[in-house]
Amino acid sequence: MPSERAPLSVVALISGSGSNLQALIDAQEQGAPFRIRAVISNEPEAFGLERARRHGMATAVLNHRDYPDRASFDAALAAAIDGYDPGLVVLAGFMRILTPAFVEHYRGRLFNIHPSLLPKHQGLHTHKRALEAGDTEHGASVHFVTAELDGGPVVLQARVPVRPGDDPGILAARVLKQEHVIYPTVVRWFAEGRLRLDADGRPNLDGEVLDEPRRIDLDQGST
């Protein structure tokens, strides 16, 4: 009989509390076919490091303030990542803009999750901007990372309603709940060999080009 596929080796990059990291850890412990080899943070006090340690994962800190420029930090970061020989790198609340050279080094094996329905509201403060724009729906997107900030091809989105009385905090909590669903889903697809980025920079899922991202719509009655 053919041997089963070995679990995909993953390195996670964080800057903060690591709630999306925790969602990936939970999925791993529930049998998802990937293993987080290490968690690396640019912030020494990031709580996500403690989450990783509680689960016996290797951790490392590369404080970007210790480097003279973005390129030198990214070079050191890539060296640290490559020491774990990962098949995938996931940005889980990693609040650094990455250089084109770094992104190209991990082309096709670098994911990010962004709290908006890309291409809408790239960058920061997405929940506030969605409310100011009068959006009736909001959400989160998992995408392959390219040199364009929040501009890589989107694989999966979760859409949530914007409700009367929402403020940025309420809306953020509704979106975050769905982030914890879609990020492990996409990483699982990649680990199972179902998802890849083709030579033309297009996401392929189960042998089909995704001209549009797959979508999950939150039940309008849910919170």
Image (cartoon, helix red, strand yellow):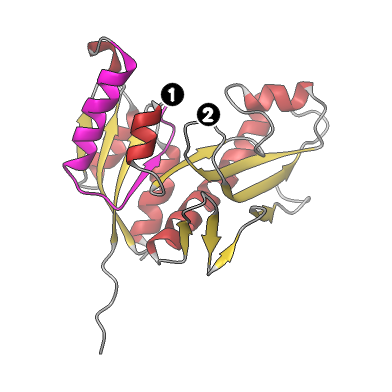
Q: Looking at this view, is 18 or 189 the one in front?
A: 189
Q: Looking at this view, is 70 or 123 the one in front?
A: 70
Q: Is residue 79 left or right of residue 101?
A: left
Q: Position of residue 192 (x, y in %)?
A: 40, 67
User: Relative to residue 215, is residue 151 depicted above or below?
Assistant: above
Q: Which residue is mark 2?
A: 149
User: Relative to residue 189, is residue 174 depicted above or below?
Assistant: above
Q: Position of residue 38 (x, y in %)?
A: 24, 43
Other residues around mark 1 within 10 Å, as few (<14) / some (14–19) / many (≥20): few
Q: Is residue 60 left or right of residue 87?
A: left
Residue 163 in view in this figure: yes
Q: Position of residue 154 (x, y in %)?
A: 58, 46
Q: Which residue is mark 1?
A: 97
Q: Looking at this view, is 131 or 157 the one in front?
A: 157
Residue at 64%, 52% (x, y): give it: 213
Q: Which residues are magenta?
A: 69-97
Label 2, secondary structure: give it.
loop
Q: Position of residue 124 (x, y in %)?
A: 58, 22
CB under 8 Å between callouts 2 and 1? Answer: yes
Residue 114: quadrant of the picture: top right
As for residue 78 lying within the magenta part, the answer is yes
As for residue 215 lying within the magenta part, the answer is no
